[in-house]
Image: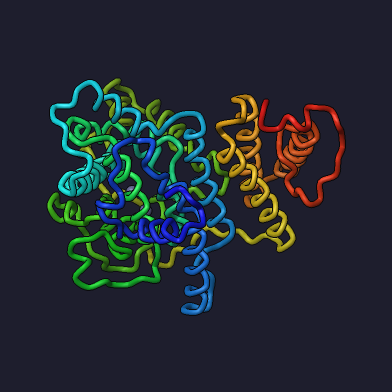
């Protein structure tokens, strides 16, 4: 299953994107044998995004994604996976801890029944992870990243939070009392992958499937900031949870995407972290200790004297004429940003490919370079006054790291030997 060009792997990878995998081919005895479905999905992410761009252009005559928004979304996806360089995913680590010590019964790992129970269990837990991520402000501070795009396309699916993984793991622990970690490790990935293709406006009503499954139309409503869309359609693969628990809404008026108060920036660390700072500042405006605490625990729209989730009628009114934030920037600058983004993407992939052989120091250096690049690209897109200074410092760092062998030559075919000391050839062994 690990072979990158094995036709079976390609077929499995493609089907995994749509949850078209059988229990037979995805049941494993050991956690180490569970494929990295999400990691292996990169070519399918890229392929489907290109397909959406082409089909979208043919259908509408305009690109369905803008460079500034799309790059910010992909950057967020890159940042969200950085913790995996240094640790196993929080969800699986905590799950295995509980399974090893506290399991009450042990469902067989190779039974189709176990597989289907785990599918329902993961999707049910995801519903509650997702619902509380909208209803509890300090978890919303993480999840708002995913909602911060004012567009709805496949790149939006990749706009993920760096910090949400540090709270979501707790919701899956009840399953660790009976379902083996291998089955959980498969479904937590398949559930995430399924949610990629539903982030598109190009697929309309899917008929009877809309009754049972989360579809592009249902999830489109979830990304809306119209008052009828707020806190609706939390489901992952199945929409039946929303129908059962009263959080379902069908599409009515034109959906306006994004946060209730758009952030109007592409600065990637701000996108990831700004809401934590906002909550901190907001809590200081309240006088009582209980109101200060409730700022973090109640919903994002809550105010003293209002219900736990606040009153959505207090949110800014929409006219339906809202235009997404899309500053104009010159073509040469766009080309520059694309090239340096791709170079940083190469370094990012390189760290993941070589994480077993790179030292922690080298990994930290390369990760820091990637973060600095994504930040600087955001400054350039925003055209901030300090963008030039930051970009100059970044370029100096990039050249220095290459010069002293802390980073692979970004364009190997253009690389020339600049020194012959052992340090150069010690790349991968620092
Ligand atoms: Zn959400
Ligand atoms: Zn989404």
- Up/down of 203 relative to 176, above or below: below
- Left or right of 401 in this view: 364: left
Q: In which quarter of the image is residue 92?
A: top left
The residue closer to the viewer here, 176 or 302, is 176
- Left or right of 298 in this view: 371: right
Residue drawn 23% across the image and 47% down it: 123
* Image location of residue 104, percent across then percent down: 13, 27
Q: Quadrant of residue 239?
A: bottom left
* Image location of residue 144, percent across then percent down: 40, 44
Q: Number of numbered discs present? A: 0
Residue drawn 24% across the image and 44% down it: 122
The residue closer to the viewer here, 283 or 413, is 413
- Left or right of 235 in this view: 41: right
Asked if residue 303 can be seen in this view, the reply is no
- Up/down of 333 relative to 391, above or below: below
* Image location of residue 327, percent across then percent down: 60, 58
Asked if residue 356 can be seen in this view, the reply is yes
* Image location of residue 282, percent across then percent down: 40, 32
The residue closer to the viewer here, 355 or 283, is 355
Applied colour scheme: rainbow
Q: Quadrant of the C terminus?
A: top right
- Left or right of 69 in this view: 133: left
């Amino acid at each position: 299953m690990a072979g990158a060009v094995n036709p079976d792997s390609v077929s499995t990878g493609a089907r995994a994107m749509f949850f078209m995998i059988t229990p037979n081919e995805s049941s494993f005895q050991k956690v180490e044998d569970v494929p990295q479905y999400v990691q292996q999905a990169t070519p399918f992410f890229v392929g489907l995004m290109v397909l959406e761009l082409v089909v979208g252009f043919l259908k509408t005559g305009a690109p369905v994604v803008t460079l500034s928004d799309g790059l910010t979304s992909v950057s967020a996806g890159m940042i969200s996976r950085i913790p995996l360089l240094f640790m196993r995913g929080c969800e699986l680590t905590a799950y295995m801890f509980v399974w090893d010590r506290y399991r009450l019964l042990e469902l067989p790992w190779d039974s189709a029944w176990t597989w289907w129970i785990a599918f329902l269990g993961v999707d049910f837990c995801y519903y509650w992870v997702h619902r509380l991520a909208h209803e509890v402000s300090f978890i919303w501070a993480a999840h708002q990243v995913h909602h911060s795009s004012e567009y709805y396309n496949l790149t939006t699916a990749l706009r993920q939070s760096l910090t949400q993984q540090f709270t979501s793991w707790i919701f899956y622990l009840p399953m660790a009392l009976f379902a083996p970690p291998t089955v959980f490790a498969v479904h937590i990935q398949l559930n995430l992958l399924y949610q990629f293709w539903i982030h598109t406006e190009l697929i309309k009503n899917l008929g009877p499937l809309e009754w049972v499954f989360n579809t592009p139309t249902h999830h489109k409503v979830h990304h809306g900031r119209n008052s009828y869309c707020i806190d609706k359609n939390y489901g992952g693969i199945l929409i039946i949870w929303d129908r059962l628990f009263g959080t379902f809404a069908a599409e009515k008026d034109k959906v306006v995407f994004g946060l209730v108060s758009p952030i109007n920036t592409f600065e990637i660390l701000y996108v990831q972290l700004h809401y934590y700072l906002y909550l901190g500042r907001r809590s200081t405006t309240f006088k009582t200790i209980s109101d200060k605490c409730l700022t973090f625990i109640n919903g994002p729209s809550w105010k003293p004297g209002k219900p736990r989730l606040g009153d959505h009628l207090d949110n800014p009114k929409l006219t339906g004429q809202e235009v997404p934030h899309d500053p104009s920037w010159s073509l040469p600058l766009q080309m520059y940003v694309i090239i340096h983004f791709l170079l940083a993407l190469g370094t990012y992939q390189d760290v993941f490919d070589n994480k077993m052989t790179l030292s922690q120091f080298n990994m930290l250096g390369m990760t820091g370079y990637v973060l600095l690049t994504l930040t600087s690209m955001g400054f350039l897109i925003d055209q901030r006054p300090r963008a030039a200074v930051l970009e100059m410092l970044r370029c100096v760092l990039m050249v220095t790291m290459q010069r002293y062998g802390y980073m692979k030559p970004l364009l190997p075919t253009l690389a020339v030997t600049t020194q012959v000391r052992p340090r150069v050839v010690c790349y991968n062994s620092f």
